[in-house]
């Protein structure tokens, strides 16, 4: 009887943590190096700029609603990059340009991107191609290709995504800030935990 009560209490506690209270630590990286570190992949990867002609290639993995977002990105002037292995789509990354303010996590943690700066976002590799070094390879390609028009690149991930952080740092990005975003009963709070260049990118908000 005691064991069943304990198990029930643990189950309720897990549900509470999952649905009532949630948090994420978002880490933001910066790169102003015009010559990023050379990155190699385990297999030959082809990278292509996303256009209206190939944007639908992502449908082999992405739902149509997300590909429609990619089409909107193109319309707004963003640059997209698809990676292919054996002519099959395996990765996408998108770049948006300043001046603008970009949200990083569920509508929280705003990042101000100035003129001649860019934010690399929506990067993801399909599960079957992970562990091959695809993401840092594409990231290095983006920095090399756009360095003539972009002085500073930003990219973000979550602190618990160790593989993503290693890939970003491998290219030559350095940690800029760490921001904790919390959600309690649907209300979101954010707090910057690291000073950035003498200023704070964000403040406590509700």
Image: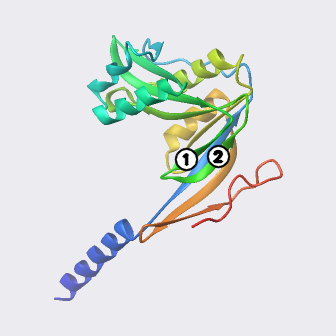
What residue would you read off at disc 2?
Answer: 111
Q: Quadrant of the N terminus?
A: bottom left
Name the residue tied to disc 1: 104
Mark 2 and mark 1 in contact (Cβ < 8 Å)? yes
Q: CA distance from mark 1 to mark 2?
A: 7 Å
Residue sitting at the far right: 198
Label 1 crowd (10 A; few <14 / some 14-19 / many >=20): some
Image-based side of 95 in relation to 65, left or right: right
- The colour scheme used here is rainbow
Q: Does dot 1 land on a helix, a strand or a loop?
A: strand
Q: Nearer the viewer, residue 117 or 135?
A: 117
Left or right side of 191 for 183: left
What is the x, y in percent for residue 177?
Answer: 68, 49
Residue 3 lies left or right of residue 186; in this view the side is: left
Residue drawn at the location 68% of the way across and 22% of the way down:
36
Q: Position of residue 27 (x, y in %)?
A: 60, 48
Dot 1 or dot 2: first in sequence order is 1
Spot occupied by residue 34 in the image (x, y as percentages of width and height): 74, 20
Instruction: Give the quarter of the figure containing the C terminus.
Output: bottom right
Q: Residue furthest left?
A: 1
- In this view, the residue in front, 68 or 41, is 68
Q: Residues within 10 Å of mark 2 (few under 14, many from 20)?
A: some
The correct choice, above or below, for 112 with respect to 189 in the image is: above
Placement of 6 over or under 29, stated as above or below: below
């Amino acid at each position: 009887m005691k064991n069943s009560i304990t198990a029930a209490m643990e189950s309720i506690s897990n549900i509470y943590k999952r649905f009532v209270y949630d948090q994420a630590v978002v880490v933001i990286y910066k790169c102003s190096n015009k010559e990023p570190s050379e990155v190699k992949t385990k297999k030959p990867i082809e990278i292509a700029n996303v256009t209206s002609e190939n944007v639908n290639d992502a449908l082999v993995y992405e739902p149509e609603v997300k590909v429609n977002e990619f089409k909107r990105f193109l319309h707004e002037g963003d640059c997209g990059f698809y990676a292919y292995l054996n002519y099959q789509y395996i990765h996408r990354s998108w770049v948006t340009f300043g001046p603008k303010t970009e949200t990083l996590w569920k509508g929280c943690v705003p990042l101000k991107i100035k003129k001649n700066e860019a934010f690399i976002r929506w990067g993801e590799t399909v599960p079957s191609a992970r562990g091959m070094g695809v993401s840092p390879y594409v990231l290095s390609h983006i920095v090399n290709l756009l360095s003539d028009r972009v002085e500073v690149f930003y990219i973000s991930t979550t602190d618990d995504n160790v593989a993503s952080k290693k890939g970003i740092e491998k290219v030559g990005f350095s940690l800029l800030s760490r921001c904790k975003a919390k959600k309690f009963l649907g209300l979101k709070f954010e707090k910057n935990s690291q000073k950035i260049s003498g200023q704070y990118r964000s403040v406590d908000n509700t």
